[in-house]
């Protein structure tokens, strides 16, 4: 065989080899593409695992039996912050779609798409009636001017003929725009999955307001009742000393009782707690007659006797008959007109209405606005060290004063407030979460008179459980409006004089969620994403340096690469 034939064979072998390599490459790429369409995985390298769904979320999505449709109203021209929220929402819903087996279907809709103002207004009214909250946003338009636009940062979830609204924007006036948007993006998974869980679940938890002890009526808690009804079956009723009457409820609410509890009713609540029932206590230890104060300008704060002190003490708290005064407080209208003249009202700070601070490191209070309170008391944790875990949820500011009762309360005190140096009792606790195994207040007591049915078992210790105690019954109370013989509940937490909406509704809702539901969703709400904002001072000081690095350095690298490449090519082929 001559050299020419050898070269032909080598060339043929090389072609075959190249063809085989090319075929293998195509085959491997095709296999990768196929597997990527069937299998799904991603590696989350962030320290807080911000792109990883929790196990609770995955389980809820996998258990969807039908298709779930989500309409997100974040489309069209909007500020960059809302565009970031849109991107984060899309990424989250893509994850939902994968883990649900493509049962989650979503679309983004621009509610302001129509050029007809009447049509847009009709769409806005419809979204508002469904529970979505609008916000006004300012942003730069294409011509460089400033534009204002109504945005509905929310979604409507549809499943099996039912629909629920999801509001995505957390608008805390204490925080700046960037922090509010960050907190909103941080809470996307919780907001969506909580609604998905409720709308797709066959089980509807029941919640009850206790009656029979002068508690707030259905109108005074009407707003929070309507909000709770989105997630729970809500009842109201009298205990009547009947053991087991509360057993079907995931949580019960005791909202500002004004009359003493009988021992029989206390026994029913105690055994409900021992068997794992959650209780939200909203208790006043001091009685203040606001109507008398409005009409006469003076009233007396006295101890409220409702016969719960021993029970709450046994569980781990004491509500002291002391009133908190706080420089950080709400305002009330005061008539400054002289007698006989037309009333003239001006807003004035009222020290007895503190604006309570929620602690940020707990799911119940995370990302909440201030909580508006009225004649709030001081709450202490007591005893049961180690067995009961105690967590302060709400507290006053550093400029706090504590007033013991009995005390005369006068509207005239607004004109002559205490000296600032007297506000020297900072950070008074106003709400506490207790978790653990509680001991029955009826342990080692005669209980035969409370048990009519011999089949009822008495427990002297609870299973692991939780309860929340708030030292102000007005935290859950909404104002009412009377129109044409109709009583209309107003928005809980809204100040009628400043139109500021405080975090009362979200606080109560979170508290009930925490007490009534399994802990899986708590894991989601507890997640924290690090807000990595740019250092504006450093940007200004080092602007030129980074401009050089980003523009000149890449060019220099390319030139250097070209020179090195040319040098080695010359050496190789010289």
Image (cartoon, rainbow, N blue to C red):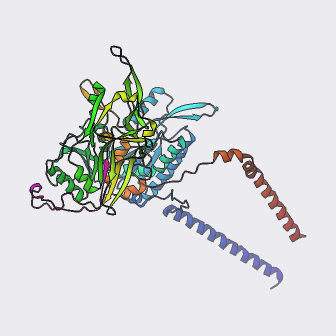
Q: Residue 391: give x, y in percent of width and height.
A: 37, 54
* Secondary structure character of the magenta stretch overall: loop
Q: Which residue is the extreme one toward the bottom?
A: 1
Q: Is 401 on the left-hand or right-hand side of 295?
A: right
Q: Residue 490: give x, y in percent of width and height.
A: 33, 33
Instruction: State the residue in front, 423 or 65.
Output: 423
Instruction: State the residue in front, 191 or 68.
Output: 191
Q: Which residue is the extreme one toward the top?
A: 340
Q: Residue at x 37, y 25 (%)?
A: 334
Quarter location, residue 537:
top right
Q: Is 485 on the left-hand or right-hand side of 143?
A: left
Q: Residue 252: give x, y in percent of width and height.
A: 25, 49
| Image: 347 above or below 184 | above
Instruction: State the residue in front, 61 or 6.
Output: 61
Residue 249 visible (yes or no) = no
Q: Is 215 on the left-hand or right-hand side of 160?
A: left
The residues colored magenta run 441-469
- Residue 443 within the segment the image draws in magenta: yes
Q: Residue at x 24, y 56 (%)?
A: 273
State the quadrant of the C terminus: bottom right
| Image: 358 above or below 409 | below
State the quadrant of the N terminus: bottom right
Q: Residue at x 53, y 53 (%)?
A: 530
């Amino acid at each position: 065989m001559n050299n020419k034939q050898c070269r032909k064979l080598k060339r043929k072998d090389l072609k075959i080899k190249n063809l085989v390599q090319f075929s293998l490459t195509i085959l491997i790429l095709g296999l990768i593409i196929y597997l990527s369409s069937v299998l799904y995985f991603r590696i989350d390298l962030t320290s807080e695992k911000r792109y990883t769904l929790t196990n609770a979320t995955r389980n809820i999505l996998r258990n969807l039996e039908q298709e779930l449709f989500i309409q997100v109203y974040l489309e069209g021209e909007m500020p960059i912050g809302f565009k970031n929220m849109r991107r984060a929402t899309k990424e989250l819903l893509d994850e939902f779609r994968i883990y649900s087996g493509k049962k989650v279907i979503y679309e983004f809709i621009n509610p302001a798409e129509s050029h007809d103002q009447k049509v847009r207004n009709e769409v806005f009214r419809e979204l508002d009636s469904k529970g979505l909250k609008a916000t006004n946003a300012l942003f730069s338009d294409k011509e460089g001017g400033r534009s204002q636009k109504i945005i509905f940062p929310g979604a409507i979830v549809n499943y099996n003929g039912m629909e629920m609204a999801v509001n995505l924007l957390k608008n805390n006036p204490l925080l700046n725009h960037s922090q509010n948007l960050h907190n909103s993006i941080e809470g996307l998974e919780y907001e969506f999955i909580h609604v998905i869980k409720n709308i797709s679940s066959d089980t509807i938890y029941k919640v009850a307001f206790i009656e029979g002890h002068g508690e707030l009526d259905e109108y005074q808690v009407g707003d929070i009742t309507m909000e709770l009804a989105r997630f729970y079956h809500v009842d109201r009723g009298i205990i009547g000393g009947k053991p087991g009457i509360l057993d079907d409820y995931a949580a019960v609410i005791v909202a500002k009782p004004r009359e003493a509890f009988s021992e029989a009713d206390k026994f029913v609540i105690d055994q409900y707690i021992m068997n794992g029932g959650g209780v939200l206590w909203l208790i006043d230890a001091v009685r203040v007659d606001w109507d008398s104060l409005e009409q006469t300008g003076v009233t007396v704060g006295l101890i409220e006797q409702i016969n719960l002190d021993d029970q709450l003490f046994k569980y781990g708290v004491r509500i002291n008959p002391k009133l908190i005064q706080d420089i950080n407080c709400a305002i009330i209208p005061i008539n400054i007109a002289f007698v006989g003249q037309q009333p003239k009202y001006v807003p004035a700070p009222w020290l007895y209405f503190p604006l309570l601070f929620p602690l940020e490191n707990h799911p119940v209070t995370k990302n909440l606005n201030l909580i508006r309170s009225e004649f709030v008391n001081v709450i202490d944790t007591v005893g049961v060290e180690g067995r009961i875990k105690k967590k302060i949820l709400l507290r006053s500011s550093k400029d706090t004063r504590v007033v013991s009762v009995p005390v005369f309360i006068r509207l005239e005190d607004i004109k002559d407030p205490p000296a600032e140096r007297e506000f020297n009792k900072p950070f008074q606790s106003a709400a506490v979460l207790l978790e653990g195994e509680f001991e029955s207040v009826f342990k080692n007591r005669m209980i035969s008179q409370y048990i009519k049915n011999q089949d009822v078992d008495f427990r002297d210790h609870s299973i692991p459980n939780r309860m929340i105690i708030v030292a102000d019954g007005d935290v859950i109370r909404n104002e009412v409006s009377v129109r044409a013989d109709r009583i209309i509940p107003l928005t809980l937490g809204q100040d009628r004089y400043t139109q500021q909406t405080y975090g009362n509704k979200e606080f109560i809702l979170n508290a009930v969620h925490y007490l009534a539901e399994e802990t899986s969703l708590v894991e989601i709400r507890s997640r924290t994403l690090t807000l990595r904002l740019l250092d504006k001072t450093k940007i200004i000081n080092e602007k030129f340096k980074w401009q050089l690095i980003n523009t000149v350095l890449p060019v220099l690298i390319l030139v250097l690469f070209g020179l090195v490449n040319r040098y080695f090519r010359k050496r190789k082929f010289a």
